[in-house]
Image (tube, grey):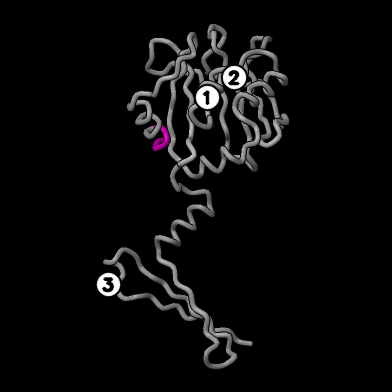
């Protein structure tokens, strides 16, 4: 049975209206009236393509990942410390690997930096190794540990990343990246001594955007 595909593109006026409409008609060859057709705007196709390939569709992608992670940031910190006793200096919900994982930076009691990879669904340790090039800030002097900082930030939104950061600051603070249910991303700074949360200054977000542009 032969099938004929005819692609018809709408007139140029459709471009002015806000998008090109492409109609796809399939003739099954069974006779008149057997044509099925569907139409989607280029905006719809782009949105579908972005979601299907993990493209940028706002904070909703982070929302889906946060919801998919059965293990919270505080739980990930606890699981990492079971694998490597010490103190956690950073947590990150990683979507660049097959499957969703938490990556934890731990300053072990042996004085070495360790990277622990945990299944974000079960908390199971998938990998752990000594990181000889880790330049993370030592969490040893912080009265508020990573798990506590994650719980504080988690009271406001879902935590997807947490680091003890001293960039452009007189002293290090816990920097938590969070996402709310409506898909908006926020950054909170947690005082490592008092645990007081504050919204990150606007220039912090600008710095993150510039870092992303450099990648």
- Foreground pick, 92 / 146: 146
User: Looking at the picture, does residue 210 appear above or below residue 51?
Assistant: above
**Numbered range of the magenta stretch:** 211-215
On the picture, is 203 further left or further right than 94? left
Labelled disc at residue 183: none
Residue farthest along the bottom direction in this orientation: 31
Label 2 vs label 3, nearer the camera? 2
Q: Which residue is mark 1?
A: 162
- Foreground pick, 155 / 75: 155
The first of marks 2 and 3 along the sequence is 3
| Mark 1, secondary structure of its residue | strand
Q: Which residue is mark 3?
A: 13
In which quadrant of the rendered view does residue 82 lie? Answer: top right
Please tell me which residue is depicted at 68% across the width and 10% down the height of the picture.
110
Q: Which residue is mark 2?
A: 147
38 falls in the magenta region: no
The first of marks 2 and 1 along the sequence is 2
Label 1 environment density (alpha carbons within 10 Å; few <14, some 14–19, many ≥20): many
Residues at marks 3 and 1, CA–CA distance in whole angstroms: 49 Å
Question: Is there any visible trace of residue 14 in the rendered image?
Answer: yes
The first of marks 3 and 1 along the sequence is 3
On the picture, is 202 further left or further right than 119? left
Residue 167 spot, x, y in % from top left: 41, 18
Please tell me which residue is depicted at 45% across the width and 62% down the height of the picture.
45
């Amino acid at each position: 049975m032969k099938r004929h595909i005819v692609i018809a593109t709408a007139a140029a006026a459709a471009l002015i209206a806000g998008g090109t409409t492409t109609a796809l008609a399939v003739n099954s060859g069974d006779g008149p009236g057997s044509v099925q057709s569907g139409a989607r705007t280029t905006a719809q196709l782009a949105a579908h393509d972005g979601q299907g390939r993990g493209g940028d569709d706002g904070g909703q992608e982070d929302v889906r990942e946060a919801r998919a992670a059965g293990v919270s940031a505080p739980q990930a910190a606890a699981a990492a410390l079971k694998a490597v006793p010490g103190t956690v200096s950073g947590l990150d919900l990683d979507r660049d690997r097959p499957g969703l994982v938490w990556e934890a930076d731990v300053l072990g009691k042996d004085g070495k930096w360790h990277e622990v990879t945990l299944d974000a669904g079960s908390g199971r340790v998938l990998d752990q190794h000594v990181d000889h090039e880790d330049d993370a800030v030592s969490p040893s002097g912080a009265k508020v540990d990573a798990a506590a900082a994650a719980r504080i930030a988690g009271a406001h939104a879902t935590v997807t990343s947490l680091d003890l950061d001293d960039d452009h600051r007189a002293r290090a603070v816990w920097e938590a990246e969070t996402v709310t249910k409506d898909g908006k991303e926020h950054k909170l700074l947690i005082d490592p001594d008092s645990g007081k949360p504050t919204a990150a200054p606007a220039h912090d977000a600008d710095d993150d955007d510039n870092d992303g542009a450099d990648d």
